[in-house]
Amino acid sequence: MAQAKKNKRVAHERYVRRRNSEQRRELQRETERKLVRGINRIFDGKAPLVTPTADGVRMSEVLERFVDPYRPTTDSKNEYIGLLRMGMIAWNIALLPASKRKAALRKQLAVVPDDGRRAQSEGIVLELIARKEQEFPDCRRAIVDFALGGTGKRWHLSVISTP
């Protein structure tokens, strides 16, 4: 009798894992479809071919690791999207020659209200640029766009980057 209960519990756990895995895959597919639809709108239906990279490095995983030290400061999906945007800006500025970074940073931060948030954002972006140079010096791919799908703990990040 105890063995039958154990077998039933194990079977249920397998079912739950399989269902969660299927839900994760569907969330990933939907997020990627959303990102591709957006890119197609930008390129008027003539979007560049989206293919996996030869080195197998997923820029979505890189971007998540890149902003990870700041993730605990975000309390909502919108705040996390804002952090990912700052990460994308910092990452791409870090790829520029040092002589062009200041102007690029000024241009990117021009849309941030100058009520103290601009200085705070600039500080975070500068810290992220330093982090990019220290932790990811060999990754020279630019981040073109990203999409974050899902809710709560079931977020899925898709990133389009240069090869």
Image (tube, helix red, strand yellow):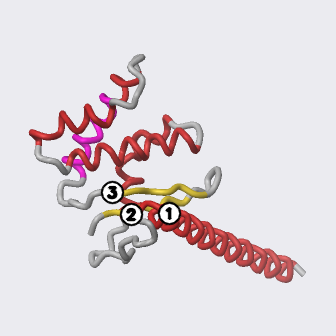
Residue at 18%, 54% in the rendered image: 137
Amino acid type shown at disc 2? Ile
Residue at 16%, 48% in the rendered image: 96
Q: Please identify the residue farthest to the front as the structure is shown.
A: 44
Write down the residue under mark 3.
143
Q: Position of residue 35 (x, y in %)?
A: 50, 63
Residue 76 covered by magenta stretch: no
The magenta stretch spans which residues? 122-135
Left/right of residue 13 with respect to residue 144 in the rendered view: right
Amino acid type shown at disc 1? Leu
Write down the residue under mark 1.
35
Write down the residue under mark 2.
160
- Which image quadrant: the N terminus? bottom right
Q: Please identify the residue farthest to the right as the structure is shown.
A: 1
Where disc 1 sits, the SS reads helix
Residue neighbourhood size for the residue with mark 1, other residues' Cα within 10 Å, grouped as few (<14), some (14–19), many (≥20): many
